Image (cartoon, rainbow, N blue to C red):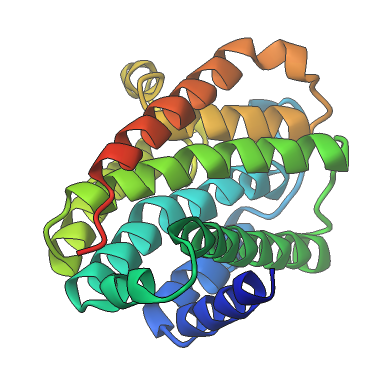
Amino acid sequence: MRGLGKLTLYNLKLYLREPMASFFTLLYAPMMLVLFGSIYGNEPSPMFGGRGTVDVSVPAYIALVIVTVGLISIPIGTASRRETGVLRRFRATPLRPLTYLVADVAVYFAVTALGVLLLVATGKIGFHLKFQGNVLSVALGFILGMSAFTALGYVVAGLSPSGRAAQAIGMFVAFPFMFLSGATVPLEALPAGVRSVAQFIPLTHVVTLLRGLWTGGSWGSFGKEIAVLVGVLVVGVAVSAQTFRWE
């Protein structure tokens, strides 16, 4: 446990020292919220069932933070460390490989949770964000969505030959996910054809689940979303276990 704690702290420091990763994880979503919140405000809107733009944007932006870490930060970080020999050196230490993986996942979860807290604080302080759900339910929804996209991130990392390739692949997948899933533009504002396509995007189900739980919905109302995300998690773990490489 002592080795796990030290390794987790070390990886956390490395992550926070990377300006690009820190920006997109901690500041990008709050900046988006400030920008669009300043334009549209948070007055109740019939489009959103009497809720304000900020009220529906915050849970969607949580999904934005998740996909940024899952499909960009994890693939780039893992593939770059493999390319530079860092993973090989970790494997040569007395620490078990599982210890490294647990520490790595813990750091990604921690920084994503911190990004979410900054986002919620921005909404609450700047726009009187309303929350009608259960904190535990939303937290579990976040864990499920983050777990699924963490698994996808390690799949991309395992299939990428280099850090640069991981960056290209991750962004190629992540940006359509962001703009077609409701994570940036609300699903209600998207054309019907785009909404139909969005149902095949895993991030759409994170957005739908988090928005529903945020407004007080029960887990029983989101069977499809849960099934999709659990499926992504299971398949992602199985594939990443086969494709993960130390060198």
Looking at the image, residue 96 sits to the left or right of residue 34; the answer is: left
In this view, the residue in front, 179 or 98, is 98
Please report the residue visible at 75 percent of the width from the left and 19 percent of the height from the top. Answer: 219
Please report the residue visible at 60 percent of the width from the left and 57 percent of the height from the top. Answer: 109
In this view, the residue in front, 32 or 28, is 28
Looking at the image, residue 245 sits to the left or right of residue 10; the answer is: left
Looking at the image, residue 23 sits to the left or right of residue 152; the answer is: right
Q: Is residue 62 above or below residue 216?
A: below
Please report the residue visible at 43 percent of the width from the left and 56 percent of the height from the top. Answer: 68
Q: Residue furthest front?
A: 94
Tell me the quarter of the picture where residue 209 sits: top right
In this view, the residue in front, 98 or 69, is 98
Q: Is residue 127 above or below residue 185?
A: below
Q: Is residue 181 visible?
A: no
Tell me the quarter of the picture where residue 120 sits: bottom right
Q: In what quadrant of the picture does the N terminus appear? A: bottom right
Picture coordinates of residue 224, whole percent (x, y): 56, 12
Q: Is residue 20 visible?
A: yes
Picture coordinates of residue 244, whole percent (x, y): 28, 49
